[in-house]
Image: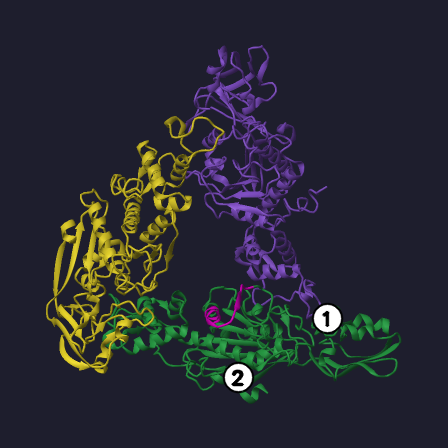
Chain colours: A green, B yellow, C purple
C-alpha cells in the first residue's frame, strides 16, 4: 500500500546475516491460530484479532488441560478487557494473548491449541524511499513497520511518513531524503549495518511514531541534545498554538536507540504525540483505528513539514550594509509615517539585518528574536531580493518545501 | 542651554553628505502653521503646540474643503484628547496632528491651510562634549535631541546626560567620556560615519532616554549581551532598592540600533524607566513637563553615576598572600573576639582576598558574592592600602567618580 | 581516644614557627578558673563547664569590685540561659563566659577572680591518619579539634571522621586518604605550610563538621564550584531520601577557607547538617551531647561513605559494541517477553552502554540519566563482566569502599 503512493524499494536480508552484534533471525509466518474449549468452540481466535498470538510463536497443535495452557496465556489484569500485544523474538516460545476477563471465564477441561505458524530460514524485509536533493547530505525519516495492526504505535508513523514523502516528491530539495519502513530494533540495526556510507551522510533525522492520537506533541531530543533537528523541532513546537513538551534523550524508546548509539551518535530525534507506555491503549487491542484521528494525523504531518521547512531554509546570510541600519524606507521596506510602532514584518527585517553577520543562521535569529522561523525566512527572502543580504553558502536560495505547506493552505480544521 | 552648563562643541553636516547607506537630508525650519476654519478662526495652531505639525511637512498655503484636508490629519482615536507626535522624514508630505475630539468637531466647509516651513539644503546639527581621561578608551553617553518638546522621550535624556557631564567635569577619570546630543537615527548614523576611529575606541556606552517618568527602571542590554556595561547596569539595578527589569537586546528602539548594528557591535545599552510605546503618553502631547519629575530625574542620575562608578573602578587585583588567609587580625581588619559572626565589611574583605587571583574583576567578585560593588570596592581599597593586594593594571588606583556620587550624599529624597 | 581506634600520628609545631602570613602562637593550658562572690562561693566555675573561661585567657588572680569585672564577662542577652563560647586567640585578654541570667544575678561587692592558666612557648598539636591507596593522589578528610566540648560544631566531625577512617582501614583503595584532626584556622594553615607536596596531591576533600544534629544536610561547594567532589556530594544528597541543600562557596566558614584560598584552590567542600550560626545552640553550652544523636551521626557517616564510593568508582568505560545496541537478550541481560516496559536495572544498562564513549564518567552518566550512582555502577560492573565494556584507565576495576557501606547493610534505623 505504501508502494502504491510513493516509489518504494524493498530489500530482503537473509536469515543468519550478521548485523553488528546481532543475527538476522528466522522468518515467522502465520496462517491461523486458535484455542478451542472443551465444547469445541474457539475461545481464542487469531482470525478475530491478530494480537491473540504471542508474536514469533513456534507452531503447536495439541490438546492439553487448562493448567498446562495457562502459563502460555498473556493478559493485562489492570485492564481486564484489553488484549495485550506481546512478542518473544529471541526466546523460542508459544503463547496466546487475551483479555483478562476472557481468561477468567475459561473453565477446567481440555483445550485444543493450534498455532499454524512457520519459523524458518527466510528474510527480513524492509522498504526504503529515497528523494535526491541538491546536496548528498541526507535527512532520515524512520518508522517501524513490525506490528501495523497497532494504530498509533505503528500505523500512524507509516501513514504520516508516506504522506510526507508524497509532499517531497518532485520538489527541488536542498537535502536528500531517505524514508525507512523497517521492523523495530533489528530493522534499524540491519539497515545501519548495511549502509554505513549512507549513515555517514545523515545530517538530521526523525523517528515518527505514535502521532495519530489526541495527546499533545512530544519531541525527544537526539543524544547530541542540541543538534539542528532538536532546535528545529523545539522551535516549531514552541510556535505551534498548543502545548507540547520537549524530552531529553534517553536510550530507551524507538529506533533512535540505534541511530543514537555511541558509534553513530546521529542527530536523530523522535516525534510523538502521547509517549509510549504512558497511555492505557499502548501495546493493547485498544490501540486501534478509533484511537487515531485524521485531524491529528494531518496536524502531525504539518508539524513534520514545518520542521523540514526549517532544515531546508536554515541558511546564514551576511548583511552587506553592516554599518548602521540600511535605509529601509527608500526601498519601501519601512513604514513611511514616523512616530507609530512598527509592524511585525518590519521587526523581522530588523532582526535579520542585525544578526546576519555570517555567524547566525536564520534559526539562530528566530530563536533569539522569539519570532517564528517562517517570518524570519520571509524577511530574509525580501532583504535578499533587495540586495541587502548575501548568502554564505554557495547554493542559491530557492523556494523549496515551504509555500504549499504553510498551515494556512495545507490542512484546515474542518 | 546645554552649552551653558558643559563644554559643548556643535557640528554642522551639509545636506547631501553620504553617511553609510543614507544621505543627510534637507534642513527643515518652520515659523508658523495653522488651519483656519470656515469662520476664519484658527482651529489648529502651531503657536499653541508645536506637535500640531507633521514634522518635516513641506510648505503649503491653500484653501480646501474638509474632505481634501482630512487625509492630512493625524489623530489617536483610542486616546481622543491627546495630540500625536508624527513625522514624515523621508517621504515628502504635509499634515497636521490634533486630538481626535478636535477633528470630530470640524464641520464641513472650506479650511485655510498654512504651513510656513522651509525644506532646503542646509545642515544636520549635533553637539558633542568630550572629557579626556587617563585612557583614550571611551565611554559613550548618547541621547537624541530631535524633538525635545516631548519631555520623557527626549528631554529627560538630555537633562540627565548634561548633569552627568557636569559631575564628570574636572575629575581625574580612568576613561575618556563622550556625550552626544544628536537627532535620532540619522544623527547617530552621521556621527558613526564621520567618527570611525572614535567609535573603535568606545568600550562602554549608554543611550539615555525616557528616564524622567515614574516607571521603574529598564535596562536594555547591548547586542553583545554580556558586555561589562550590561553587567554593570544589571548589578547596579539589582542592588537598587526598587524593582527593575533587564531587557534582552532587540534591534528596534533608540540609537543603540545603530551602535549595535553588526558592523559596529558596540557595547552600548539603553537605560530607561518606562519603555517606549508601553505608556499612553508616549509620542503624544501628554509627554510633557508634568509627566516627568525632579526626583525621578535625580534617581536616574544616581543610577547612571553608579554604573559609571563600576566602570571606573572595576579592576583586577592579585592577593599577594594567596596561600591561606592572611592574618587580618593583626592588621586590625578582623574582629578581635572569636566565636561571634563576622560583619558585612569583613565578609567583603574575605571575598576580595579569596577571588583576587588576577582573573576575577571586582565586578566578578561583587556578582559572585552577592554584595554591592561599592562594598567590594571599599574592601579592595582597604586591602590595597594594607599591602595585601597588588594591581594587575599599570595605572594606580585613584578615587574617581565615586565618593560624592554615593546615594548617601548626592541626591536625597526630600 | 581517636588514636585508640585508628592509626594516628601526632605532630608538634613549636611556638614561633612561621606558617605563611601567620606565626604559631603560644601554647595555652588551663587547670582551674573561677569567680568567687562576696560570700566566698564560686559563682562561675570552670570545673562545671569549660566554656566559662574565655579561651586563651591570660592568667589572673585578683579581687576586684563587680564594676571592674563586668567588662570581662561575656553573655548572650537574647539567649539568657546559655553560656557562650568565646575566644581571644590573638589579642591578649582574660574573661569569663556565663549565662546572661547568671550575670544579672550578680550583686555588688568584691569578687575573687582566678584563672590558673599558662600562655607560654610550647607547641601546636595536630593528628594525622593516612591510608595509602593504589594511587598517590589523595582524598582529604579534615575536621577541627580545637573545642571538642562543643558537640555538633566540633565533636561530631571528629567522630564521623574517625569511623570513616575505620571503614577504610585495610581496604584496597583507589585513592590514598588523609585524615586531619587539627585546630581550626591556624591548624589548617600550619598543615598546609608544612605539607606543600601533599597538598599538591589532593584531588578531592571534605571538611566535616556539624553533622550530628537533626537538621537536614548542607553541602557547601569548593571554590572551584564544579569539582568532582562537588558533583559527587550533590549527587549523593539528591538521591538521599530527605531534603538537603547545596550551598555555593563562600570564603567564610570552616577550614575550607584555607584549602580554597586562591594559592591552593583545592577541591575541598564542606559537609554539614545545620549550618554554622543558623541555630541557637551554635557556639553555646547548648551544643552538647544531647544536641547530637547516634542516628544522625550514622546517617552522616553513610553519606560520607556514599560520596567516597562515587570517588572510588567513578571511572570511564568504552562500549566495545558501540554500533547499535548489543544484543542483551542472548546474554540474559534483557527481559525475554517483548511488549512490556523494561525494569530499572535494564534501563541503567542501556544508559551505561549509550554513554560509555570514553568521555562520560559513571558520574556523568548517573547525572544525565537521573539514576543513582550505585545503579549505574552496578550496571557497569555487569556489562564489564560480560565483555561489553572496556576500561579507559589502566587500573583494573576492583570492589573497594562499596558493598558493606550500602545503606541497606551498613546502618539501619532502629
Residue C202 magenta-highlighted = no
Residue A196 makes an appearance in the image: no
Residue B163 visible? The answer is: yes
Task: Tell whether B390 sits left or right of C204.
Answer: left
Kindly identify which numbered label has been placed on residue A79: 1
The crowd level at tag 2 (other Cα within 10 Å; few <14, some 14-19, many 20+) is few
Residue C87 appears left or right of B122: right
Q: Secondary structure at mark 1?
A: loop
Residue C44: assigned label: none
Report the span colored magenta: A232-249
User: Residue drawn 71% across and 81% down?
Assistant: A50
Find residue C385 and report its horizontal and vertical position in percent.
65, 56
Quadrant in the rendering for residue A43: bottom right
> Where is C128 relative to A106, above or below?
above
Question: Toward the viewer: A342 or C301?
Answer: A342
Cα separation between marks 1 and 2: 34 Å
User: Crowdedness of circle 1 by 10 Å Cα count: few (<14), some, many (20+)?
Assistant: some
Quarter of the figure with residue A356: bottom left
Image coordinates of residue A44 in percent, x first then y, are 79, 80
Quarter of the image where one finds residue B13: bottom left
Contact between labelled residues 2 and 1, with CB atoms less than 8 Å apart = no
Q: Tell me where residue A412 appears, x and y as whole percent.
A: 49, 83
Query: Toward the viewer: A173 or B375?
Result: B375
- Which corner quadrant holds the N terminus of chain C? top right
* Chain letter of disc 1 in the image: A
Instruction: Assign the C terminus of chain C to one quadrant of the image.
Output: top right
First in residue order: circle 1 vs circle 2: 1
**Residue under circle 2?**
A414
Output the chain of dot 2: A
Identify the element where label 2 is drawn. loop
Amino acid at each position: 500500500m505504501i508502494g502504491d503512493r510513493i516509489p518504494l524499494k524493498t530489500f530482503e536480508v537473509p536469515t543468519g546475516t550478521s548485523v553488528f552484534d546481532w543475527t538476522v533471525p528466522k522468518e515467522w509466518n502465520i496462517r491461523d491460530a486458535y484455542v478451542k474449549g472443551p465444547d469445541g468452540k474457539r475461545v481464542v481466535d487469531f482470525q478475530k484479532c491478530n494480537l491473540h498470538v504471542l508474536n514469533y510463536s513456534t507452531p503447536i497443535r495439541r490438546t492439553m488441560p487448562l493448567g498446562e495452557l495457562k502459563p502460555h496465556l498473556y493478559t493485562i489484569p489492570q485492564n481486564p478487557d484489553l488484549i495485550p500485544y506481546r512478542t518473544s523474538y529471541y526466546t523460542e516460545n508459544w503463547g496466546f494473548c487475551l483479555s483478562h476477563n476472557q481468561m477468567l471465564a475459561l473453565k477446567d477441561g481440555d483445550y485444543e491449541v493450534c498455532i499454524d505458524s512457520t519459523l524458518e530460514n527466510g528474510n527480513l524485509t524492509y522498504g526504503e524511499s529515497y528523494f535526491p536533493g541538491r546536496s548528498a547530505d541526507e535527512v532520515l525519516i524512520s518508522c517501524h513497520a513490525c506490528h501495523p495492526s497497532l494504530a498509533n504505535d505503528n500505523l500512524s508513523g507509516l501513514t504520516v511518513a508516506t504522506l510526507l514523502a508524497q509532499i517531497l516528491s518532485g520538489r527541488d530539495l536542498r537535502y536528500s531524503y531517505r524514508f525507512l519502513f523497517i521492523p523495530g530494533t533489528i530493522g534499524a540495526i540491519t539497515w545501519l549495518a548495511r549502509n554505513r556510507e549512507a549513515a555517514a551522510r545523515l545530517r538530521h533525522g526523525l523517528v515518527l511514531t505514535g502521532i495519530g492520537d489526541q495527546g499533545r506533541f512530544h519531541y525527544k531530543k537526539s543524544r547530541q541534545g542540541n543538534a539542528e533537528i532538536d532546535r528545529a523541532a523545539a522551535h516549531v513546537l514552541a510556535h505551534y498554538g498548543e502545548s507540547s513538551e520537549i524530552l531529553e534523550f534517553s536510550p530507551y524508546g524507538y529506533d533512535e536507540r540505534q541511530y543514537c548509539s555511541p558509534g553513530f551518535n546521529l542527530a536523530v530525534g523522535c516525534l510523538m504525540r502521547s509517549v509510549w507506555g504512558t497511555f492505557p491503549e499502548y501495546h493493547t487491542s485498544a490501540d486501534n483505528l478509533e484511537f487515531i484521528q485524521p485531524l491529528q494525523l494531518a496536524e502531525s504531518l504539518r508539524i513534520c513539514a514545518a520542521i523540514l521547512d526549517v532544515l531546508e531554509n536554515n541558511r546564514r546570510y551576511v548583511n552587506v550594509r553592516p554599518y548602521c541600519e540600511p535605509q529601509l524606507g527608500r526601498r519601501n521596506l519601512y513604514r513611511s509615517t514616523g512616530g507609530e510602532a512598527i509592524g511585525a514584518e518590519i521587526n523581522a527585517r530588523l532582526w535579520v539585518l542585525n544578526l546576519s553577520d555570517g555567524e547566525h543562521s536564520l534559526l539562530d535569529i528566530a530563536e533569539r528574536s522569539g519570532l517564528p522561523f517562517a517570518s524570519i525566512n520571509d524577511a530574509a527572502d525580501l532583504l535578499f531580493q533587495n540586495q541587502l543580504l548575501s548568502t554564505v553558502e554557495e547554493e542559491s536560495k530557492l523556494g523549496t518545501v515551504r509555500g504549499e505547506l504553510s498551515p494556512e493552505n495545507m490542512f484546515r480544521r474542518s
